[in-house]
């Protein structure tokens, strides 16, 4: 909505209609703002606060939650959250008043989720159950934090499910090279897997790459975006985290390979995707290559784990590896701690040497 300047006083004001939770339109005016930006900020804050009458239906509050949160999240992240809200949460809570939802209501909802079985008699996984509860709790937390809701009934009821991380699989360098040989009959697939393994980038980062992302003279690859397929559309988004924006130094052989690959792409433009394929295609090719090479089948993302494990084996530090793959160093240390060689014995030996040298110096002085 627009803000207006008071020509007489030189200040800004807002004048607008808003719809309260009952659907009744009302007019609001506020004057005396030094800047247009402050006037618009006040208007937005007012609409957020005023619309959230805690006696409204849960469904109405969810619409406010969506308005507040949607633009702050990546499109693919929001798509997942919205699906959960629409299909697993609103179907149960939508007609209840926000302020009337009690922990016992949450427990009853949890029991429904726990008792669910699909056509094959399969229940929701513990990880998915935890995700469902976390989303419901996030909605109530939003009410507590910003709109004066007294407590979060989902937090009081307690969680359900559990967070079970998928097993982290790796290929050794020898296993990858066998797989790469099997991929050479399809150059597009071969080069895609070469970049994934030797640079450790994510699948979405690979599929967003364009010729402009490569500097073949310097041998570098810039990661600035990610590819997603959402609701039948190709969507280019920012990378997963701010740390994911990075420049990767490629080995010389890979620089030459990708340079040749780009030259082979007929009239490709600098901003065109180089790997114009789907994630499904990559997964199919992984199946084919693993079978032909006689190596264990791993997930596409496990190529990233394989890259990290190779760098650890080569003796690089967690900090250096984190910069290359777009992680925080603490995450590398935590996730891959079991792969780092133990330094405890070496540390003790070095400390012993330091102490021995100190004593020698001390003995020399006393003499």
Image (tube, rainbow, N blue to C red):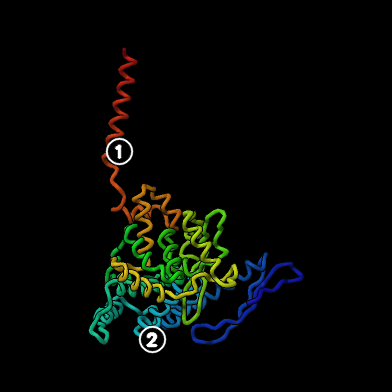
Front-lying residue, 323 or 4: 323
Find residue 243 and name its label: none
- x and y percent of residue 185 in the render? 41, 70
Residue 313 to residue 165: above or below: above
Give the camera-side residue of 345 and 37: 345
Q: Quadrant of residue 263?
A: bottom right
**SS at mark 1?**
helix
- Mark 2 or mark 1, which is nearer to you? 1
Q: Which residue position holds label 2?
A: 95
Residue 357: percent from left, percent from top: 32, 25
Could you say which disc has been placed on residue 347 in the image?
A: 1
Foreground residue among 322 and 136: 322
The percent position of residue 76, horizontal first and vertical second, equals 45, 74
The answer to whether one can see residue 129 in this image is yes
Q: Position of residue 358 (x, y in %)?
A: 32, 24
The tag earlier along the polypeptide, 2 or 1, is: 2
Q: Residue at x 32, y 55 (%)?
A: 336
Q: Are marks 2 and 1 in contact (CB under 8 Å)?
A: no
- Quarter holding residue 300: bottom left
- The residue under the point 37% across, 65% down is 181
Q: Considering only vertical position in the picture, is 64 above or below 208?
A: below
Q: CA distance from mark 2 to mark 1?
A: 63 Å
**On the image, which quarter does residue 139 sit in?**
bottom left
Number of residues whose C-alpha sits closer than 10 Å to that of mark 1, classed few (under 14), some (14–19) or many (20 or more): few
Extreme residue in the top direction: 367
Residue 237 versus residue 170 in the image, above or below: below
Image quadrant containing the N terminus: bottom right
């Amino acid at each position: 909505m627009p803000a207006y300047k008071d020509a007489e006083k030189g200040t800004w004001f807002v004048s607008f209609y808003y719809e309260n939770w009952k659907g009744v339109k009302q007019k609001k005016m506020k004057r005396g703002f030094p800047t247009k930006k402050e006037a618009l900020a006040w208007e937005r804050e007012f609409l957020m606060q005023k619309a959230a009458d805690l006696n409204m239906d849960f469904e109405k509050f969810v619409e406010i939650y969506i308005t507040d949160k949607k633009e702050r999240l990546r499109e693919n992240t929001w798509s997942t959250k919205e699906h959960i809200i629409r299909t697993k949460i609103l179907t149960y809570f939508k007609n209840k008043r926000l302020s009337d939802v009690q922990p016992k209501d949450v427990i009853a909802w949890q029991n429904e989720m726990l008792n669910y079985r699909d056509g094959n008699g399969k229940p929701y996984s513990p990880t998915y159950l935890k995700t469902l509860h976390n989303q419901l709790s996030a909605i109530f937390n939003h009410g507590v934090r910003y709109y004066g809701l007294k407590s979060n009934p989902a937090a009081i009821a307690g969680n359900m499910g559990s967070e079970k991380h998928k097993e982290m699989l790796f290929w050794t360098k020898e296993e990858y090279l066998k797989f790469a040989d099997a991929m050479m009959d399809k150059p597009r697939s071969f080069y895609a897997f070469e970049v994934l393994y030797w640079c450790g980038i994510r699948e979405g980062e690979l599929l967003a790459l364009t010729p402009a992302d490569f500097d073949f003279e310097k041998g570098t690859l810039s990661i600035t975006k990610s590819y997603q397929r959402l609701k039948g559309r190709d969507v280019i988004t920012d990378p997963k985290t701010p740390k994911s924006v990075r420049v990767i130094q490629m080995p010389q052989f890979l620089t030459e390979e990708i340079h040749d690959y780009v030259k082979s792409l007929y009239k490709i433009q600098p901003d065109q995707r180089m790997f114009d394929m789907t994630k499904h295609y990559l997964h199919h090719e992984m199946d084919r290559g693993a079978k032909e090479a006689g190596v264990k089948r791993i997930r596409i993302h496990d190529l990233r784990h394989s890259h990290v494990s190779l760098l650890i084996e080569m003796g690089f530090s967690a900090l250096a590896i984190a910069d290359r793959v777009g992680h925080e160093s603490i995450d590398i240390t935590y996730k891959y701690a079991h792969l780092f060689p133990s330094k405890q014995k070496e540390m003790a030996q070095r400390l012993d040497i330091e102490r021995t040298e100190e004593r020698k110096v001390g003995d020399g002085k006393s003499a």
